[in-house]
C-alpha cells in the first residue's frame, strides 16, 4: 500500500473510532460536567452521566490521562452502580466540592485519584478497563461565556446529551444563579429547558415575611430562549428607591429561580407596601431587555 492509501486507511479508522465513541457515549456513561479551574485551595471535579436505559458499574471504567495523541496513565474508578439517567461526580476532595457547591446528592460524590486538568485546556478521557475510549472532551477556556471576567471556580456544563461530547458548542459556563456548578444534579445550561421566548414568573405577587412558613419568600422562576445572558435584578419601593439588589450582572442558566425574602440590602425587613422587581437582561452583542414585576408586601 502506498503512502496515500495508508493515510486514507488511517483517516477511515479514526472516523470509525470517533463514530463508535459517539454511539457508546450516547447509550451509557458519558461526560456531563468538568471543573478544571477551581479557585485556589479548592478541588477539581468530573461529573459523569448514565445516558443509557440500564445501570452501569463505575468500576468498569477508567479516567485516562491523554498524552499527545495516545492514552497515558489509567486511573481506576471505585465500585458504584450508576442508575439509568443518573449522575456521579469524581473528585480528589469530596468535602471541598460539597462546601463550595450546591450538591444535590452527597452519596454521589466519589473520592478517587484523577489527572490534573490544565487551566489553559486539555483532554478528559473516559475508557473501559481494557482501554477502549468511551468518551472524550477536549476542553478549552474558549468554551466559557465571553461575558465572564473570571473563570476560576466556574464549571463547564454539557448542554445536551443528544449532541456529541466533543462539540465545543455543546459546552458552556454553569450559571451563577446555580452557584457556577451543579455537581450531582441537572445542568443549569441544559438545552432541554430552552423556551421559545423569555419567561419570568413569580411564584406569588404577595409576600408575607412573618416567619409563619406561608409566603415568607417569593421566587422568580425563569426560562430563556438562549443560554448566554446576564442579568441584574433590583427591588424598588413605591417611591422609586432601591431597597435590594438580588443579582448584579449574574450569568443565568437556561432555567432557574431567584428568591426575595422581603429584606433590604442591610438585612432589615421592609415595611408593607408595593415593590417593583426590575429585571434587566444583557446579551453577548450588547442587546438589553428590561422587565418589571410587582410584589405586594403584606406584613401582619
Image: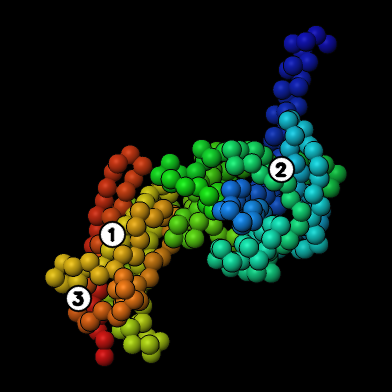
Q: Are marks 3 and 1 in contact (CB under 8 Å)?
A: no
Q: Which mark is residue 279?
A: 1
Question: Which sits in the foreground, 75 or 189?
Answer: 75
Name the residue beneath numbered marker 2: 125
Q: Position of residue 46 (x, y in %)?
A: 66, 53
Quarter of the image for the C terminus: give it: bottom left
Relative to 213, is 22 on the left or the right? right
Label 3 neighbourhood size at 10 Å, few (<14), some (14-19), many (20+)?
A: some
The answer to whether residue 280 is seen in the rendering is yes
Secondary structure under tag 2 reads strand
* Residue 45 versus residue 169 in the image, above or below: below
Residue 7 sits in quarter = top right
Residue 167 sits in quarter = top right
* Residue 96 versus residue 133 in the image, above or below: below
Outermost residue toward the top in this view: 2
Question: Which sits in the foreground, 166 or 246?
Answer: 246
Quarter of the image for the N terminus: give it: top right
Secondary structure under tag 3 reads strand
Label 1 neighbourhood size at 10 Å, few (<14), some (14-19), many (20+)?
A: some
Instruction: Please give the name of the residue rendered at 33% of the width and 83% of the height, measured from the top-left corner.
Output: 209
Name the residue beneath numbered marker 3: 274
Q: Position of residue 79 (x, y in %)?
A: 81, 62
The answer to whether residue 134 is seen in the rendering is no
Q: Earlier in the sequence, mark 2 or mark 1?
A: 2
Q: Position of residue 287 (x, y in %)?
A: 28, 43
Instruction: Please give the name of the residue rendered at 81% of the width and 52% of the height, measured from the top-left corner.
Output: 76
Q: Earlier in the sequence, mark 3 or mark 2?
A: 2
Instruction: Please give the name of the residue rendered at 56% of the width and 63% of the height, measured from the top-left corner.
Output: 100
Coloration mode: rainbow
Label 2 neighbourhood size at 10 Å, few (<14), some (14-19), many (20+)?
A: many
Relative to 48, is 269 on the left or the right? left
Q: Earlier in the sequence, mark 3 or mark 1?
A: 3
Amino acid at each position: 500500500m502506498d503512502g496515500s492509501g495508508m493515510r486514507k486507511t488511517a483517516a477511515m479508522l479514526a472516523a470509525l473510532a470517533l463514530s463508535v465513541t459517539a454511539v457508546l457515549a450516547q447509550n451509557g456513561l458519558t461526560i456531563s460536567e468538568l471543573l478544571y479551574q477551581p479557585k485556589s485551595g479548592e478541588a477539581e471535579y468530573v461529573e459523569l452521566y448514565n445516558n443509557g436505559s440500564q445501570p452501569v458499574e463505575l468500576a468498569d471504567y477508567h479516567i485516562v490521562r491523554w498524552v499527545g495523541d495516545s492514552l497515558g496513565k489509567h486511573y481506576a474508578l471505585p465500585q458504584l452502580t450508576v442508575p439509568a439517567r443518573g449522575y456521579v461526580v469524581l473528585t480528589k476532595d469530596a468535602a471541598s466540592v460539597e462546601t463550595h457547591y450546591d450538591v444535590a446528592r452527597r452519596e454521589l460524590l466519589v473520592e478517587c485519584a484523577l489527572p490534573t486538568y490544565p487551566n489553559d485546556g486539555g483532554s478528559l478521557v473516559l475508557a473501559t478497563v481494557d482501554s477502549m475510549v468511551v468518551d472524550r472532551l477536549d476542553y478549552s477556556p474558549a468554551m466559557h461565556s465571553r461575558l465572564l471576567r473570571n473563570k476560576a471556580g466556574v464549571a463547564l456544563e454539557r448542554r445536551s446529551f443528544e449532541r456529541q461530547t466533543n462539540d465545543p458548542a455543546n459546552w458552556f459556563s454553569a450559571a451563577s444563579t446555580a452557584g457556577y456548578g451543579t455537581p450531582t444534579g441537572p445542568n443549569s445550561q441544559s438545552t432541554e429547558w430552552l423556551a421559545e421566548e423569555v419567561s419570568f414568573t413569580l411564584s406569588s405577587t404577595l409576600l408575607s415575611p412573618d416567619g409563619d412558613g406561608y409566603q415568607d419568600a417569593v421566587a422568580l422562576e425563569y426560562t430563556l430562549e438562549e443560554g448566554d445572558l446576564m442579568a441584574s435584578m433590583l427591588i424598588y419601593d413605591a417611591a422609586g428607591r432601591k431597597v435590594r439588589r438580588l443579582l448584579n450582572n449574574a450569568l443565568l442558566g437556561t432555567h432557574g429561580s431567584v428568591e426575595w425574602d422581603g429584606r433590604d440590602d442591610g438585612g432589615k425587613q421592609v415595611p408593607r407596601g408595593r415593590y417593583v422587581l426590575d429585571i434587566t437582561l444583557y446579551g453577548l452583542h450588547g442587546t438589553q431587555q428590561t422587565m418589571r414585576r410587582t410584589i405586594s408586601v403584606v406584613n401582619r
